[in-house]
Image (cartoon, rainbow, N blue to C red):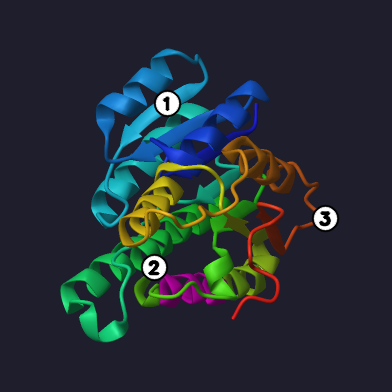
Amino acid sequence: MKSILITGASSGIGRATALEFLQAGWRVGLIARRAEVLQDLAQAHDNAMALPCDVTDAGAMQAVFDSFVAHAGRLDVLFNNAGMFGPSAPIDEVEIDAFDQVINVNVRGMFIAARLAFAQMRRQDPQGGRIINNGSLSAHNPRPGSICYTTSKHAITGMTRSLSLDGRAFEIACGQIDIGNARTELVDDLNARILAEDPKADLMPMMDVADAARSVLHMAQMPAQANVQFMTVMATKMPYIGRG
């Protein structure tokens, strides 16, 4: 049975992806801070394992990785997904602490998870595995007022490229999925901010979050000799191409 660890698994894209992999017959480790939510999900699925943890806590992350590998036998895939948007404002209105918080979760947290996955995949027998980083359309074209989030997601693209290069010697593939406007709590929050500024504003086009989850599954199921390096999946009519 193939195994995957998913960070940010308690809601949004992470939860939808966990359900998709469970339905496909994978063993799924669920990492997030909300223990009760993870336990409810795990109790409903025999192959799910709740691993409550803060992704920015390196020691706790080591413990949950070790626990999952002891249970599953190996780690085939990491979906490095946990993240936050942060404040929506011009840079001079953003508090330094708020910027630090976004970078801590979106960059440092993903670095910790990738580091642990890489180490496990490098030493296991047979060697290798796959790391899938959750990027964003903001890694290419930012939204207005997204300086914290956009900066963090550009960093993730660099992380993806470095992991892809460094992983070649150890049969470790790395790819990035850039998701645009999947219907999640984060997008609902962005829509609420838009309506707060202008109650008559048109809301952003959205797609079902399950479409994003199926895309992650597709990337994970590629044979070892193939890799989806970058994938963009988005709501068809969102203003990504040509926006500026």
Image: 130 above or below 152: above
The answer to whether the residues at label 1 and label 3 have Cβ atoms under 8 Å apart is no
Judging by the rendered image, the residue that carries numbered circle 1 is 49
Mark 1 vs mark 3, CA separation in Å: 29 Å
Secondary structure found at label 2: helix
Judging by the rendered image, the residue that carries numbered circle 2 is 107
SS assignment for the magenta stretch, majority: helix
Residue at image x 41%, y 64%?
111
Residue at image x 49%, y 15%?
45
Query: What amino acid is at disc 1?
Result: Met
Q: Position of residue 234 (x, y in %)?
A: 66, 54
Sequence-first disc among 1 and 3? 1
Residue at image x 30%, y 74%?
89
Query: What amino acid is at disc 2?
Result: Val
Residue at image x 38%, y 35%?
10
**89 left or right, relative to 5:** left
Can you tell which of label 3 and label 2 is closer to the viewer? 2
**35 left or right, relative to 167:** left
The answer to whether the residues at label 3 and label 2 have Cβ atoms under 8 Å apart is no
Please tell me in which quadrant of the rendered image residue 164 appears: bottom right
Secondary structure found at label 3: loop
Q: Which residues are magenta?
A: 149-159
Judging by the rendered image, the residue that carries numbered circle 3 is 225
